[in-house]
Image (cartoon, rainbow, N blue to C red):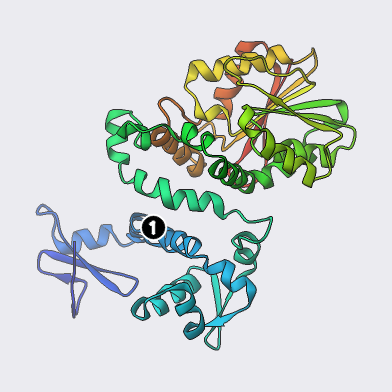
């Protein structure tokens, strides 16, 4: 496909032209159809979605670079003009205006009389100084996922991860858990991306019928914190590897929950899940292959009393596998990142729960692409 300059008509010989934005796209017509036939058949068909998706990495990388350069953190202090903000961010004068105006056009910045400011969303979620900052996951996407996804084709053809492990380096979890500073940042980013779903679970699930809850793979501890904050009678446990303990305990103390929420160290591969009335797993099962998924579901069953509940949540794929594009692409991300992980439908998860002995399973939407699957022992 080539861009034609100065084309006067929609049909030029064996080529057809179509306007996309301000670009006139030219493409060669099939030999077996004349120009009029093809254009008639394409009267209601446009390439917009194809082009927008194919070049979506332009917008993605623009946002990721803005997070990396702390554009939103700087503007959260006060709005600034191009002449003020550009030099402080280290932007070259050739690119500064285009970069900041692209962020305006994408809806991440506002500009009034030449002065740039954050939108309400970027001010709330992309200012590093705020507890609501979710940019940690975007920082990881910029540093790791963006280059790894360039190898998606290789992953699709080989079924093998394309991250550090593909070069003989330690896998991402081993590297993170070996570095306390990086681990703290990673767990904070996981809190940011999960916080909305955690708050929804805390209010939507009937915790009034239970007394205790354990969060498996608790990370910083936001899920069990939100449950305990919204349900004053719940005694909670966060279960994760020992390296997580100081990060978890700091977060629990910040939320004033030290008297009701404790940390239990251990690996869910080697140790039983601590017993509780409700067992929760958020963004855990998709990391692992099918036998491991089933093993974890069975361990959850063993940890519960009769009548106890198992709550699984992540970007559950719709059963028809047509709507939750995020969930499906998250599964591709598991292909990039793990030896056997994959995302799954609600029906898949219900099947695994039923196999383990659960009954009365249901799927409930939470927020965004996330849903929870609940099973009762």
Image position, residue 65 (x, y; %)? 44, 62
Q: Which residue is mark 1?
A: 56
The crowding category of the residue bearing disc 1, from other C-alpha atoms within 10 Å (few below 14, some 14 to 19, many at least 20), is: few
Residue 311 against residue 291 in the figure, above or below: below
Horizontal relation, residue 259 to residue 346: left or right: right
SS state under label 1? helix
Q: Residue at x 78, y 30 (%)?
A: 262
Residue 52 against residue 164 in the figure, above or below: below
Residue 311 against residue 164 in the figure, above or below: above
Residue 344 appears in view: no
Q: Which image quadrant: the N terminus?
A: bottom left
Q: Which image quadrant: the C terminus?
A: top right
Residue 258 appears in view: yes
Q: Residue at x 51, y 37 (%)?
A: 176
- Residue with the most extreme right position: 233
Horizontal relation, residue 19 to residue 243: left or right: left
Q: Which sits in the foreground, 55 or 140?
A: 140
Image position, residue 98 (x, y; %)? 39, 76
Q: Residue at x 45, y 35 (%)?
A: 172
Count numbered badges in the picture: 1
Image position, residue 73 (x, y; %)? 58, 67
Image position, residue 285 (x, y; %)? 56, 27
Q: Residue at x 61, y 31 (%)?
A: 243
């Amino acid at each position: 496909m080539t861009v034609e300059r100065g084309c006067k008509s929609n049909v030029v010989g064996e080529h057809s032209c179509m306007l996309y934005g301000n670009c006139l796209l030219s493409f060669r017509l099939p030999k077996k159809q004349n120009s009029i036939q093809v254009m008639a058949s394409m009267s209601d068909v446009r390439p917009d979605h194809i082009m927008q998706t194919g070049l979506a990495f332009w917008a993605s990388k623009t946002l990721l670079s803005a997070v990396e350069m702390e554009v939103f953190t700087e503007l959260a202090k006060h709005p600034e003009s191009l002449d003020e903000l550009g030099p402080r961010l280290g932007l070259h004068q050739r690119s500064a205006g285009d970069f900041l105006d692209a962020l305006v056009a994408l809806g991440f910045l506002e500009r009034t009389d030449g002065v740039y400011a954050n939108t309400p969303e970027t001010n709330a979620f992309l200012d590093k100084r705020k507890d609501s900052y979710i940019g940690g996951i975007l920082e990881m996407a910029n540093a790791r996922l963006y280059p790894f996804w360039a190898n998606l084709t290789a992953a699709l053809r080989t079924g093998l991860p394309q991250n550090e492990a593909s070069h003989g380096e330690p896998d991402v979890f081993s590297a993170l858990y070996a570095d306390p500073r990086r681990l703290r940042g990673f767990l904070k980013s996981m809190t940011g991306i999960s916080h909305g779903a955690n708050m929804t679970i805390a209010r939507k699930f009937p915790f009034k019928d239970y007394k205790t809850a354990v969060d498996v793979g608790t990370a910083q501890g936001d899920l069990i914190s939100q449950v305990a904050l919204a349900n004053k009678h719940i005694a909670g446990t966060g279960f994760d590897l020992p390296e997580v303990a100081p990060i978890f305990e700091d977060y629990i103390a910040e939320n004033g929950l030290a008297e009701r929420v404790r940390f239990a160290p251990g690996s869910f591969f080697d140790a039983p899940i601590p017993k509780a009335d409700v067992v929760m797993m958020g963004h855990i099962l998709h990391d692992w292959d099918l036998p491991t998924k089933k093993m974890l579901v069975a361990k959850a069953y063993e940890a519960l009393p009769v009548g106890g509940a198992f709550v699984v949540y992540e970007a559950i794929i719709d059963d028809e596998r047509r709507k939750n594009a995020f969930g499906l692409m998250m599964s591709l991300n598991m292909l990039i990142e793990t030896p056997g992980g994959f995302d799954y439908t609600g029906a898949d998860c219900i099947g695994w729960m039923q196999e383990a002995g659960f009954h009365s399973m249901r799927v409930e939407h939470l927020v965004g692409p996330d849903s929870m699957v609940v099973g009762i022992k």
